[in-house]
Image (spheres, grey):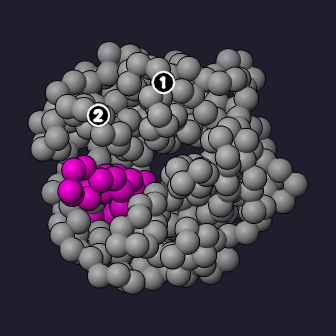
Amino acid sequence: MKWRKLGKVFDPTEHRLPNNCESFAQSPQAIVLEDRVRVYFSSREKEGNGPMFLSRVLYVDFAKDMINILAISPQEVLPLGELGTFDEHGIFPFSPVRVGNQIYAYTCGWSRRVSVPVETATGLAISEDNGNSFTRIGPGPVLGSSLKEAMLVGDSFVLPIDDKFYMWYIYGEKWKPATSTEPPARIYKIGFAQSKNGIQWEKEEGRSVIGDVLGPDECQALPTVIRLGGMFHMYFCFREATDFRRDPDRGYRLGYAYSQNGLDWVRDDNLGGLEKSDSGWDSEMMCYPHVFQLDEQVYMLYNGNEFGRQGFGLAKLESMNNA
């Protein structure tokens, strides 16, 4: 895969965002509309005067040149969950897919814990107005912890295939206890589920579909999958479990895998074609990729340094060889 970086295309600090959001445009994910490309992202609202944040979903509309900004959402597209629910403290990421005349959005809801910082699960909200607003199908998740996946289910990416829905998502394997220098560290891997209706899901519980390259404590996040040239292609981000905030060599970078059937994957990050820049906004980190097709072109949205604090960028697929 050969990509050409087009640079950072959206910086939240340069725009007036709703809901008192001032920074972060994390996990940009696109849906192509008739006259524009809508990119949903999660921004952060500081809670009171304390250090905690609430992640809220907004969007920015691009012209189909993916340069000119047409509009920014006047308010969040989905309010946070009610007291005690799985998405009370944030929604990140927010992954849209068109299903007939509706847009389904698979959400990752965040709720705070005491012994560890967070628990997550996957929810579903549906838009009847072409993606301007969404309504939950219910207050709970459609995919959450289970017998062999006890924690941290989320980052779900869904692709309709024939008469089924395929989902690639992450699940937590364990939390590592806090140390004198590190808070509790979570380990998570990419799993797979199928559904006939996009609501009830059957997981292959506890089966990591992507092999590790950093060892058993490798953390894998935010899979995105596209079918090109008769193959499935997956991008995701991965990092070390600890010291990733201070050491760029241990932080997120992009991984790549390919598959003939979407179920069994061959990982080869060297074929992915995108690496951190030598300098600038994506020189220390690349994370939260999203690959999508626009007319005859294929693009990737992704975040850079500081987990997307200063926005997201774009790359364009120039060429590819069948793996």
Compare residues 297 and 317 and report the one nearer the observer.
297
Q: Which residues are magenta?
A: 283-303
Q: Quadrant of the C terminus?
A: bottom left
Compare residues 134 and 173 and report the one nearer the observer.
134
- Residue on which the image places disc 1: 127
Disc 1 on helix, strand or loop?
strand
Residue extending farthest right: 147
Say if 193 sits above or below 134 in the image: below
Q: Is residue 31 left or right of residue 213?
A: left
Q: How many marks?
A: 2
Q: Is residue 134 left or right of residue 211?
A: left
Say if 17 sits above or below 260 in the image: above
Q: Residue 42 location in percent, x, y? A: 43, 35
Quick one: label 2, few (<14), some, or many (20+) residues within 10 Å?
Answer: some
- Residue on which the image places disc 2: 33
Q: Which amino acid does the dot numbered 1 rest on?
A: Ser
Main SS, magenta residues:
strand
